Image (cartoon, coloured by chain):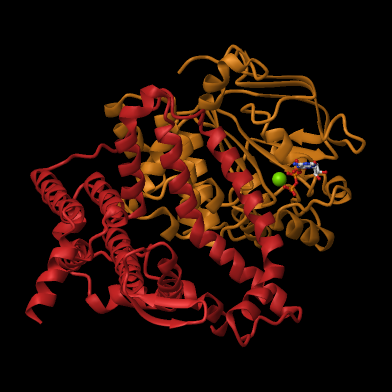
Chain colours: A orange, B red
Amino acid sequence: MIRAEEPLIRVEGLHYTYQAGTPKPIPALRGIDLTVQAGEYVAVIGANGSGKSTLLRHFNALLLPTAGNVWVTKWNTRDTVHLRDIRSTVTMVFQVPDDQIVASVVEEDVAFGPENLGVPEDELHQRVDWALAAVGLTELRHRASRLLSSGQKQRLAIAAALAMQPRCLVLDEATAMLDPAGQTQVRKILHQLHQDGMTIISATHNMAEAVQAQRVVVLSEGRIAIQGDPRFVFAQEETLHALQLDVPYPTRMARMLATVIRDFPTDVLTVTELAEAISMHLGQPLELRPKPTTGVR
Amino acid sequence: MSRRTEFEFLGRVTIGQYLPTGSALHRLDPRTKLLVCLLLIAVVVASQSLLGIMLLLGAVLIGLALARIPLSFALSGLRAMLPYLLLLALLQTFAIPQYAANATVLWRWAMLTITDRSILAGILLIARFSVMVLGLSLFSFSTTTTELTHGIEHLLRPWQKLGLPAHELALTVNIALRFVPIIAEEAERLMKAQASRGADFGQGRNFIQRTRKLLPLLVPLFLVSLHRADNLIEAMEARCYLGGKGRTHLIHLQAHAADYLALAAAFALMALVIGLSTANADQLLWRLLSTYL
Ligand SMILES: Nc1ncnc2c1ncn2[C@@H]1O[C@H](COP(=O)(O)OP(=O)(O)OP(=O)(O)O)[C@@H](O)[C@H]1O
Ligand SMILES: [Mg+2]
């Protein structure tokens, strides 16, 4: 693997205003500085309207800054000559499953992106095969895309993004409309992709998903309020509450237990960690099955 | 689901449904079926000969049998349109006499006249529409929307060099067709939401009343559709869609011997029908019949 001498995404002094130049401008981003290194897993959280979607749309030039700059590797997103390069380096998965499927057959939808890139045919077939396998949809490749379940549709959307062979996958609340089983499946896929070296940026309201990231970026009213690894961010429960955000359930529970149990650790993030802390307190070490948090069916 | 009754009319229209019977006709190249269909429509419109149109009707019925489509199902689609067809035919019957010079008047009352010509015109109209409706039904019964769009794109691709947006047209058709069930779902959701707040979509006495009750749905439905279209555009842009230029293709259509055979048969039949029409075959037949009867 190449050593990343330059960040994959670099955001400097980013301002974005909707309806700029009209009597009613809506400032959505007000000065964001952010770098994402290749291979990172970043979760973006924040209350409704804090600017998550707006920020994410700058990462592949769907929106261009009102002020400031965004670079994807060495390309400035304002540089329209590199639009194809930028959008095939950073691909997006959106919230509503139905609204991002273009073709009416599963495999043809996966092929839509690389077809647009003019990928030669034999490679096209390889990419489709690989992307479908990565999300476990190989069996359904000839199905009508509208007959899939929401979870399957969202996996299809991920496959369609992967078929562009991006370096970075950006997801805007991609699990928001899925049932718990669907959410878990997508979370597992993201985890696996990250293990294989993909850079992942995911906006989410689901704290269990944010915990899986290496870095959590908290947005508030168009600015970055806090950022750091999940343990650092979720330790600041009061600040998060003020921003109308919750900490993960296991963290909250640990904090409750800490009010009655002396020295109970409050920096737990997952169910496993909570179970471990409780069993430690009871003096009976837990016999852990391999990785239950990410391996839940 | 009594709310579905509002879509009853649409539910009875069978055009646009796909019936996977796996017949030989289903396996034909969509380009073949598209060409034959277009040819059929052109010829049925152009042909002045009832005899020729009856031949086409026969051919379409044979096609339905080959595609293993139950005849009753195909006809039920036609039956839904029958009232409108009869109305049109009636209008036609009364509208014709002004233009026909050497027609025999059969019946006259005030401004209204019926001649032998006008009755023939009415019958022709019904026959034409029946062939068209059954022909298009047969096409849609045996062709998926995906095949249809691939067919359109492949047929138009040679003209791409002359500036015809083949891919864009095909994609437009594809997305329009794909969004029909989604919009229908959205309409149902809106109706339920409005009904729960007291709106009444119950059975009106007639078509116009029932339609009027649906009007409040149109604005929100339109807005929702625009919003969803916006989302789709964004998703397509994110996947580097910049128009048809420089695209490669996953799917390639392949014509087989059966396709050439079907095309040849269709062309022969159409030529025959055009021939019958130009040779005024109906008149010959008419004279033949009247001398013997
Ligand atoms: N197309 C638009 N036109 C005008 N204003 C918009 C538009 N999209 C978003 N905004 C506004 O910009 C601000 C940021 O919105 P954004 O969608 O980025 O927030 P978000 O964090 O993604 O929220 P959510 O959690 O609801 O998805 C909000 O005040 C919103 O009202
Ligand atoms: Mg959003």
Quarter of the rendering occupied by the N terminus of chain A: top left
Quadrant containing ligand 2: top right
Q: Is residue B110 left or right of residue B229?
A: left
Q: Residue at x 77, y 53 (%)?
A: A246
- Horizontal and vertical percent position of residue A189: 47, 45
Q: Looking at the rendering, which quadrant does residue B282 occupy?
A: bottom left
On the question of residue A203 being in view, the answer is yes
Which residue occupies the foreground of this view, A202 or B284?
Answer: B284
- Horizontal and vertical percent position of residue A61: 64, 26
- Horizontal and vertical percent position of residue B218: 67, 63
Which residue occupies the foreground of this view, B12 or A180?
Answer: B12
Q: Residue at x 36, y 45 (%)?
A: B149
Q: In this view, does B216 lie to the left or right of A87?
A: right
Q: Residue at x 41, y 67 (%)?
A: B96
Seen in the picture, residue A63 relative to A265 is either above or below; the reply is above
- Horizontal and vertical percent position of residue A8: 60, 21
